[in-house]
Image: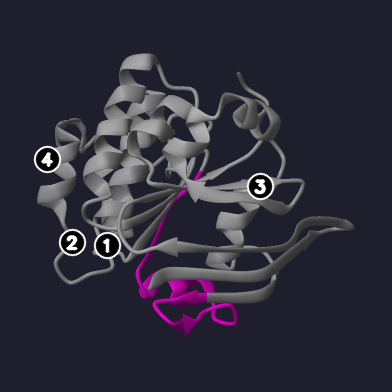
Amino acid sequence: MPLLCVHDLHVYLGESHILQGISFDVAEGGVTALLGRNGVGKTTTLRALLGLVDRRGTIELAGDNIEHIATHKIVQRGVGYVPEDRDVFSALTVDENLRLAERDTEPRYDLVYDLFPELRERGKQAAGTLSGGQQQMLAIGRALLNDNQVLLVDEPTKGLAPLLVTEVALVLERVSELATVLLVEQNLGVVNRVARDAVVLDTGRVVHIGPAKELLADKPMVQRMLGVG
């Protein structure tokens, strides 16, 4: 039984038809990777699932339709979001950023600090003074504070040094044991390591669904669909 079902999802931004009737399922548990070249609608898909953009179509979470409810109600149903550009509150401290993300009566600080001990150490530091990698830790940590059914994670390794990319991959592996993850990621090494399933978009349409490792093992298909060798 899929945890998340998307059917005939359309999004228009201005006069541009960004998502042109995409349909896919996200199985419960593990990581499903949402792949595609730049500009094909991956980030828009995540934003549409959260209700951050106007959309038309059907979105079901654990069997319940959520396409007509407000973003904060979707979040309350257990959908966490790690945006592409982290979007930390730069003038607030690390501790304040985390407190703002609290939703559950018993937020999981032990889990967050176990995964990211630096966040405890830098609790009084302004988030805007953190490195890019530390801000990414904070963005993921905010989503992990609450017991979410699904995490929407957008480009978590973007702009990070190779050592930090490896650290983020390790975190995603552990996170996938706690919640279902829908992951947008350009680093195919990370995708190959953490993802079970893959959905590929091209110009606003789904062009491939299947096991991630099978897709990545087919180099001509990767070249054709993702534009990388």
Point out residue 143 in the picture as x, y percentages from the top left corner. Answer: 33, 53
**SS assignment at label 2:** loop
Q: Name the residue under label 4.
A: 114
Which one is in front in this view, the residue at disc 3 or the one at disc 2? 3
| Nearer-N-terminus badge (3/4) | 4
Marks 2 and 1 sit apart, C-alpha to C-alpha, by 6 Å
Marks 4 and 1, how far apart at CA: 17 Å
Instruction: Note whether 188 is above or below 147 in the view shown.
Output: above
Q: Earlier in the sequence, mark 3 or mark 2?
A: 2
Say if the magenta span includes residue 64.
Answer: yes
Sequence-wise, the earlier of marks 2 and 1 is 1
Residue type pointed to by label 1: Glu
First-in-chain label (4 vs 2):
2
The region drawn magenta spans 60-83
- As drawn, the residue found furthest toward the top would be 162
Residue 79, given in percent of the width and then of the height, sits at 40, 65
Residue that label 2 marks? 107
Q: Which amino acid type is marked by label 3?
A: Leu
Describe the element under mark 1 as helix, strand or loop: loop
